Image (spheres, grey):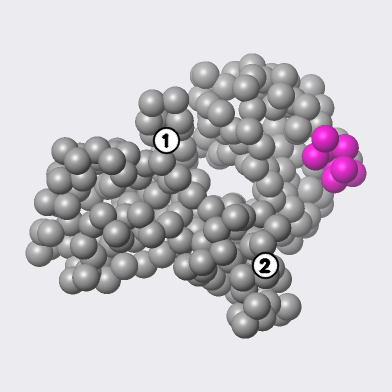
Amino acid sequence: MQKIKTKISEASIYQFETFFHLDYLSESISSSYSDKDQLSSVAKILKKDSIKSIDITHYNSPPSIIPTKYYDKNIKTKYIETNSKKLSNINDDLSRDRKITVVYSKNRSLSQILNFDDKKVNHTNYFTQLYNYLIGKLNNSNGFSFFISLSETSFEIIIFNKNEFVFFNSFGINDENEFLYYTFFVLKNYQRSIDSDKIIFLGKYERFKKFYDLASKYSKIEFIEDDINFLISYESQSFLILNENNIRK
């Protein structure tokens, strides 16, 4: 999930393990790294003189999240050893409030396939953009806020306690029962009061109604239903894009 400021001179690429998605103005293309026809179409778009920079959001690597005051740039490889097998081409992002540093491994597939030499390229991890988006939505000063982002095959939980970041994890799921199992596990470990704590879903979609109904049995639930929330499907996968500036405002 992400928040990206899109200007006319910028193209946005969302990079996953097996595919990527390009957005530029009204042009939108999803492609695997081996689809020659789609790659040719993407390359043609990116060669446009009007595109001065490319924003790449990395979904392909699970991030490590470190409080900035404890972060040591000299050992950044160590931070991702426990959650990633890719220990090269490592990047770090500083959150907007400067409280956390997000460390992750960048996927070089696109840079090897497409030529970005004449463009400015900005790299960001999806969690950094999600965190930056959520800190602008915090309004629960009395308890825990459990933010949940759902897709067809997984969901993510981000927890804030009295507006301070506490926890983040992603869970693969096959159905609503697995969703309930992991959600209940997290609630059991962090929830203090059903009166003050709440689950806040990012977006509200009919396809996930059963998930919402289950969650409402164990916690108060709310929804963030901005116009900027929408799902993009790519074959069996879905992902949520948050874009405060341009995406369907």
200 is higher (above) or lower (below) than 246: above
Nearest the viewer among 223 and 232 is: 232
Residue 97 locus on image (x, y percent) = 59, 71
Residue that appears at 53% across and 53% down: 61
Q: Quadrant of the C terminus?
A: top left
User: Is residue 249 depicted above or below 129 in this figure?
Assistant: above
Magenta residues? 185-192
**Is residue 155 shown left or right of residue 35?**
right
Question: What type is the residue that disc 1 sits on?
Answer: Phe
The residue wearing badge 2 is 79
Type of the residue with mark 2: Tyr
Q: Main secondary structure of the magenta part?
A: helix
- Identify the residue at horizontal 62%, vertical 22% (top origin): 174
Between 191 and 182, the one nearer to me in the picture: 182
Q: Secondary structure at mark 1?
A: strand
Q: Position of residue 233 (x, y in %)?
A: 39, 30
Give the labeled residue for mark 1.
230
Residue 202 visible in the picture: yes
**In the image, is residue 84 part of the stretch drawn in magenta?**
no
Q: Residue at x 25, y 61 (%)?
A: 10
In the image, residue 188 sits, relative to residue 5, either above or below, namely: above
